[in-house]
Amino acid sequence: MYIKQLELNNFRNIDNIKINFEDGINLIHGENGVGKTSIVEAIYYLGNLGSFRTSDDTALIKDKEAFANIDAKTSEKEFNIKIFKDKKELKINEIPFKKYRDYLGELNIIGFCPEDIYLFKDSPRLRRGFLDKEISKIDKKYLMDTLKVNKILKERNKLLKSFDKYKKEVITILDKKLASLQSRIINKRSKFIKSLEEEANSMKQLFEYKYDISLIYNTFVKLDSDNLENEILSIYEKGLDNDIERMVTNNGVHKDDWNVRVNDIEIKDYASQGEQRMMVLIIKLSLAQMIK
């Protein structure tokens, strides 16, 4: 599936524009300030429901306009997104999608920009978010599991902040739910990371990159455990006193991280800025192959 036509209204500095694309490589060119990056941004937004330039959707709406509009026709479907200051309206083939999670994955788009170097330099939270979004595009059950875990963790943390002996039984019930959900999340994250590593070591040949690339997934349990659920339950049971003292859940997939190593050295400690950008591009191209 590819985008055949894109139409933008009141998007960034663009009043109205309609562009036709061909299957294969398309080149967008023009003078500075005419909206080339905005066109790419709109395409990225179609697949990710977010911009690679800002987290504030209001910045995407042309000044003094009520909303921005993105229309796209692909070889298979028609997409429409209206971006308001406080909400989005999503349609595929004129059918409304009220939940973002139902829309994600319908049009898989991978973007690359120099700022993506954050994957190596910034916090684990951003790397987890990147990982979760990419897995969710191809596995809706994974997305549902992560949403359920976040909800249960909020409930558990609330109980920890006002803990008494009567709440221990409730926490035990929550821990059993967390163990089941998190074991599935860990298995899927681990499998995805391994597949991405294999694809990256194949993709590196395009860049004549000769070093071994390793993607390391760090979680709070042993990945080779015979029974992840039981191990997670054991960790929560042993760590409950510490959780009560700190009034927060200290272990879980919400603390996971992953990193890239080259010849067994973490890339952020070893590689130049240029090499780190190349590695991001290798990873992004590998993702594109995986979600085709």
Image (spheres, rainbow, N blue to C red):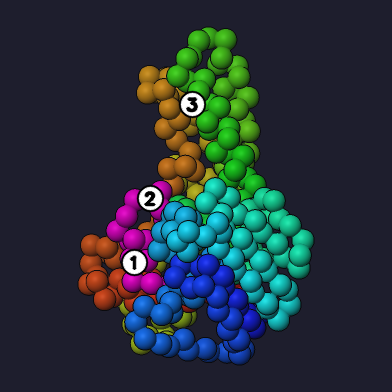
Question: In the shown orientation, is residue 80 left or right of residue 283?
Answer: right
**Residue 272: percent from the left, percent from the top?**
22, 72
Q: At which x and y percent is residue 244?
A: 43, 19
Q: Against 186, is 78 above or below?
A: below
Tell me if residue 151 can be seen: yes
Magenta-colored stretch includes residue 9 = no
Q: Secondary structure at mark 2?
A: helix
Q: Residues within 10 Å of mark 1 (few under 14, many from 20)?
A: few
Residue 124 painted magenta? yes
Do tag 2 and tag 1 residues touch (Cβ < 8 Å)? no
Q: For this rendering, which residue is in front, 238 or 10?
A: 10
Residue extending farthest to the front is 64
* Residue 131, above or below 246: below
Residue 115's disc is 1
Q: Disc number at residue 157?
A: 3
Residue at x-position 50% and y-position 23%: 158
